[in-house]
């Protein structure tokens, strides 16, 4: 049976167990009841029913107790509640039917939860997993149709108008308008030209292009996103484990209340009366049955998964329920600048070139050829000499974090980067005074000149900043830019706290320092230089559409679209999730408390009413959880058209 099919082997096993147990339970209740047969016959039928429906719950509990040292879990309370119902026969109350009903309804609830999870999973796949069915491989001037899973790095793929992009890659011929709504939720087509990167599952709405694949199928964007979703389903969030933590307190408290109810009233009313003791022990055992936490055990995990599903529909991948809880706790955001709050699409603002211009840019192209830094990507987009460089001519290549690139090409050493790189190599140069991102170039210890690049703020960055302020989340910008460029950026957005001329390890140290101050720290970044900071932070958030593998792997949450303001949507979803979870818990406890009072005040209160009421409560909370996926998360930011230094 296919993994993504709801009606799988597990479903049929669980359904068969329920049907068999229900049949035996009805037989025991009506045809083979204690009144019509005898106690041993009735008990045998009901025990067989109970074993069929509950053996897996016992097995799972003992595994948790032995291997995970979890003693007071929700499963223990389920087991105690059902066994207690059997024990009530000692007081001449035959509650065998209720004992089975507790477990039957729990298993039915699990099937409903599985279905809700399945529907959420399907909605996620609908949001992000439109898989292409064919790829047109260009080989020896011929076009061969292959399955996208056969694509290898370096393959040349032709894509026709109206088709789905089968692989991540770079356009090497043609131009097109690309619809990326399956990844970003944005239906407006984006123009892509030679040198631009495009992502698998996007739709080519207009034009014809050739792309050079830069990933295998299993590593492309859509495959990675689906893997992240699968992993997020396996993650156990804090409020999912909250059910376990809750049970650690809830179970002993229920036990204590039950013991107190069994002992204190008889001591006060009549210590010597057997009937009084019998009555309050029955009430005590009834409390244990009533306190079974089915609704909480089922609804809380489902609420988390539906919230993750809602996030995915809003271009957010959240790696597990624990991340939703962390989002609610964050009070400090540390953010990278370039490529995160700005477009990282640079234009040359100024040139200071001391040699032939073509020769200067050729040196620049050699150095930036292998780099994935935002500055490097921009430089490569407007330099056209890339094809003239043979890999075999590069004998040494190294990216020096926070400084630049050193490359040996045809025996000549080329340095491209900031002034720190030239300083540590004792190269004299003319310091550029223009505000912007300055790229210095040297060859064989001789300064060749520099260029100044400028960037643009993302349209939604001001909205992000204003919303963070409303939520009392402090913001600090961390950048490797020199002081003048950083302060110019901060001034344009009225940012009070910006730290500049930082190396990647400096950013990581700042994250650690903030955590030592008992701050709940989130880090927002996009590049390989951010990987360590993303890992160290309480919450690592990657701008993921063009992020590096290392960045995506080390983050807790990924913003698929390049819109930092989607962080605000994530905060809203986390808040919604918390409201629903707290409602599930407190409303369930209120219902339990009501029935405990009824059982205490009304002699011989029928337990089956409690069990049926608990089933209705569970169904109601499941429906409530499923409704999360239908919510609309609104954003009201106004686009900004201001150009800013980076």
Image: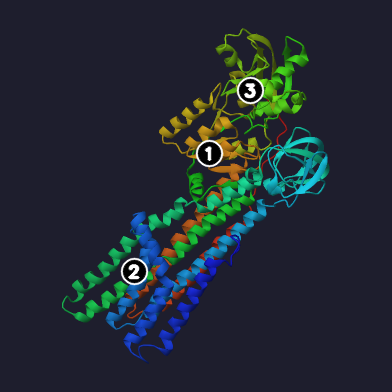
Q: Which mark is residue 80?
A: 2
Q: Which residue is mark 1?
A: 554
| Left or right relative to 229: residue 359 | right
- Is residue 432 something that shows in the picture? no
Mark 3 or 2 closer to N-term? 2
Q: Residue at x 56, y 21 (%)?
A: 501
Q: Residue at x 73, y 52 (%)?
A: 133
Circle 1 packing at 10 Å, graded few (<14), some (14-19), many (20+), is some
Position of residue 567 measured from the top left corner of the image (x, y, whole percent): 59, 42
Residue 532 vs 186, above or below: the answer is above
Q: Residue at x 35, y 91 (%)?
A: 35
Position of residue 468 measured from the top left corner of the image (x, y, whole percent): 56, 39
Q: Nearer the viewer, mark 3 or mark 2?
A: 2
Q: Which residue is mark 3?
A: 488
Position of residue 291 measured from the top left corner of the image (x, y, whole percent): 37, 68
Circle 3 packing at 10 Å, graded few (<14), some (14-19), many (20+), is some
- Is residue 457 something that shows in the picture? yes
């Amino acid at each position: 049976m296919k993994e993504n099919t709801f009606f799988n082997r597990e479903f049929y096993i669980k359904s068969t167990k329920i049907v068999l147990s229900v049949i035996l339970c009805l037989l025991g209740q009506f045809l083979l009841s204690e009144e019509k047969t005898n106690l041993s016959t009735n008990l045998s039928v009901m025990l067989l029913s109970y074993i069929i429906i509950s053996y897996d719950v016992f097995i799972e509990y003992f595994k948790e107790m032995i291997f995970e040292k979890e003693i007071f879990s929700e499963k223990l309370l389920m087991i105690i509640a059902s066994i207690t119902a059997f024990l009530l026969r000692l007081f001449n109350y035959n509650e065998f039917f209720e004992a089975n009903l507790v477990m039957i309804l729990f298993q039915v609830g699990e099937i409903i939860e599985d279905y809700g999870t399945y529907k959420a999973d399907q909605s996620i796949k609908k949001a992000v997993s439109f898989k292409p069915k064919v790829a047109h491989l260009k080989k020896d001037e011929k076009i061969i149709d292959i399955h996208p899973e056969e694509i290898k790095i370096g393959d040349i793929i032709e894509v026709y108008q109206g088709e789905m992009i089968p692989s991540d890659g770079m356009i090497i011929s043609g131009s097109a308008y690309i619809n990326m709504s399956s990844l970003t939720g944005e239906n407006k087509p984006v123009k892509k030209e030679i040198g631009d990167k495009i992502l698998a599952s996007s739709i080519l709405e207009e034009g014809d292009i050739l792309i050079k694949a830069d990933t295998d199928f299993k590593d492309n964007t859509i495959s990675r996103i689906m893997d992240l979703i699968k992993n997020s389903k396996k993650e156990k969030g804090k409020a999912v484990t909250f059910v376990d933590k809750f049970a650690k307190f809830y179970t002993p408290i229920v036990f204590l209340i039950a013991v107190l109810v069994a002992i204190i009233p008889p001591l006060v009313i009549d210590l010597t009366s057997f009937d009084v003791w019998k009555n309050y022990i029955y009430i005590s055992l009834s409390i244990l049955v009533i306190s079974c936490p089915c609704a909480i055990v089922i609804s809380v995990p489902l609420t988390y998964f539906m919230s993750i599903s809602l996030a995915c529909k809003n271009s957010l991948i959240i790696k597990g329920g624990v991340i939703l809880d962390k989002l609610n706790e964050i009070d400090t955001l540390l953010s990278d600048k370039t490529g995160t709050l700005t477009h990282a699409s640079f234009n040359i603002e100024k040139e200071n070139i001391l040699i032939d211009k073509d020769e200067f840019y050729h040196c620049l192209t050699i150095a930036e050829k292998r780099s994935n830094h935002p500055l490097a990507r921009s430089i490569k987009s407007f330099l056209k000499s890339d094809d003239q460089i043979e890999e075999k001519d590069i004998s040494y290549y190294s990216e020096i974090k926070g400084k630049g690139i050193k490359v040996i090409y045809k025996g000549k050493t080329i340095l491209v980067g900031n002034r720190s790189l030239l300083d540590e190599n004792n190269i004299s140069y003319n310091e550029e005074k223009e505000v912007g991102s300055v790229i210095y170039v040297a060859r064989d210890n001789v300064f060749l000149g520099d260029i100044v690049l400028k960037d643009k703020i993302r349209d939604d960055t001001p909205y992000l900043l204003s919303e963070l302020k409303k939520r009392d989340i402090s913001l600090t910008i961390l950048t490797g830019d020199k002081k003048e460029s950083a302060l110019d950026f901060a001034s344009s957005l009225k940012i009070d706290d910006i730290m500049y001329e930082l190396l990647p390890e400096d950013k990581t140290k700042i994250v650690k320092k903030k955590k030592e101050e008992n701050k709940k720290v989130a880090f927002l970044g996009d590049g390989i230089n951010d990987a360590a900071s993303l890992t160290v932070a309480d919450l690592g958030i990657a701008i993921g559409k063009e992020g590096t593998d290392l960045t995506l792997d080390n983050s807790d949450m990924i913003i698929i679209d390049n819109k930092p303001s989607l962080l605000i949507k994530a905060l809203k979803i986390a808040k919604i999730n918390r409201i629903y979870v707290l409602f599930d818990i407190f409303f369930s406890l209120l219902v339990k408390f009501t029935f405990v009072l009824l059982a205490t005040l009304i002699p011989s209160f029928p337990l089956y009413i409690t069990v049926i009421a608990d089933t209705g409560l569970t169904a109601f909370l499941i429906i409530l959880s499923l409704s999360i996926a239908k919510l609309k998360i609104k954003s009201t930011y106004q686009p900004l058209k201001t150009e800013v230094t980076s």
